[in-house]
Amino acid sequence: MKRRKQKKWHWEELRIAFQKRWRNLGCSMWMRAYNEQRTHQGRWCYGKTPRQTWEDSVDLAKEKMLAA
């Protein structure tokens, strides 16, 4: 009886681990598509993807940084 419970718990743990893995994989795939493939509809993005907008603005942000 004890062995059967241990086996059941083991499979439950594996099932949960695989669910988390698939959920994270799906989420990361969605984030990659959202940030790198789809164009942004924001006001100052001019049809660029969010990642392109971010990369273009890094130099501007460095110029505007104030010395502390």
Image: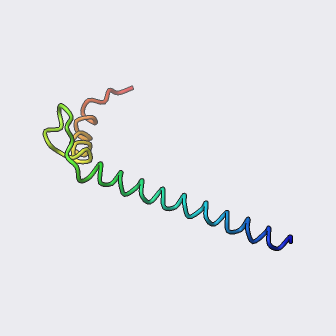
Residue 13: x and y in percent read 67, 63
Q: Is residue 22 left or right of residue 41?
A: right
**Picture colour scheme:** rainbow
Q: Residue 17 or 53: which is nearer the viewer?
A: 17
Q: Is residue 28 left or right of residue 44?
A: right
**Going by the picture, which residue comes out furthest to the bottom?**
3
Residue at figure coordinates x 48%, y 56% from the top left = 23
Q: Is residue 68 above or below residue 51?
A: above
Residue 30: x and y in percent read 35, 53
Residue at figure coordinates x 25%, y 44% from the top left = 50
The image shows a total of numbered marks equal to: 0
Q: Residue 15 or 50: which is nearer the viewer?
A: 15
Q: Is residue 22 above or below residue 39?
A: below
Residue at figure coordinates x 27%, y 34% from the top left = 61
Residue at figure coordinates x 31%, y 30% from the top left = 65
Q: Quadrant of residue 1?
A: bottom right
Q: Quadrant of residue 29?
A: bottom left
Q: Is residue 35 above or below residue 62?
A: below
Q: Is residue 20 above or below residue 65?
A: below
**Going by the picture, which residue comes out furthest to the right?**
1
Quarter of the picture holding the C terminus: top left
Residue 22: x and y in percent read 48, 61
**Going by the picture, which residue comes out furthest to the front?**
1
Q: Residue 52 or 3: which is nearer the viewer?
A: 3
Q: Residue 40 or 20: which is nearer the viewer?
A: 20
